[in-house]
Amino acid sequence: MSPPVKHFAPLARLLHWLMALMIIAMLFIGAGMVASVSERHEWLINLHKLLGIAILALVIVRLVVRFTTTQPALPADLPSWQALAAKASHLVLYALMLVLPLLGWAMISASGEPVMLSSSLQLPSIVGADAQLFALLRKAHGYLAYLLFLTVLVHLAAALFHGWVRRDEVLDSMLRGEDRR
């Protein structure tokens, strides 16, 4: 019997931190876009689209990595409600990382505009042009972005709680690799 895994796989850690940076950037870019819809901010929209598709691709890779590698167990003395909250928050994070880019893609499709990632790279539309659908998708995308922001804050608070208050190995399992002693 092999010893229990204490740290996430290196690729899982890399994807976690890369996507954390990308998601935080997306949230700030999205807030900037909502605050100003100026022509001068077209580059924000283009960056937002590009990051959204990158996040969609990476979350698929991340899910494959998660299901094909062994994850460290939560501490045995963790109250059951906290273990349930950890599992639920991860489920919500993964769902939002999948759904938000797809909603954005569908929203642009519903606007009738081509879904351009660059001047020469166009994604296919995933829904037909429809003003009412566009309005619904835009509202859903906004509300779910707020939910993502809240979930990220709770995730960060929980990580800091584990690192600074409980001082267990939960935060360390994502920060460092296996000891090489």
Image (cartoon, grey):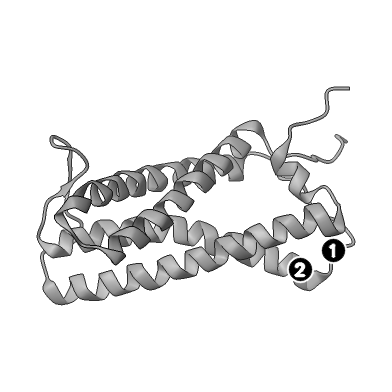
Residue type for callout 2: Gln
Label 2 crowd bin: few (<14), some (14–19), many (20+), radius 10 Å: few
Residue type for callout 1: Leu
For numbered disc 2, what is the local secondary structure? helix
**Total labels drawn:** 2
Q: Which residue is drawn at 19% across and 38% down?
A: 118
Label 2, label 1: how many angstroms apart (C-alpha)?
7 Å
Label 1 crowd bin: few (<14), some (14–19), many (20+), radius 10 Å: few
Image position of 123 (left or right of 171): left
Q: In this view, does 67 lie above or below 141?
A: above
Image position of 54 (left or right of 18): left
Quadrant of the drawing holding the C terminus: top right
Q: Mark number for residue 78? A: 1
Residue 30: give x, y in percent of width and height. 35, 59
Q: Mark number for residue 115? A: none
Q: Which residue is drawn at 20% across and 57% down?
A: 126
Q: Residue at x 77, y 50 (%)?
A: 170
Instruction: Name the residue carrying label 2.
Output: 82
Residue 7: give x, y in percent of width and height. 75, 39
Image position of 115 (left or right of 1): left
Which residue is at the front of the view, 8 or 135?
135
Q: In this view, does 89 lie above or below 40?
A: below
Residue 161: give x, y in percent of width and height. 77, 60
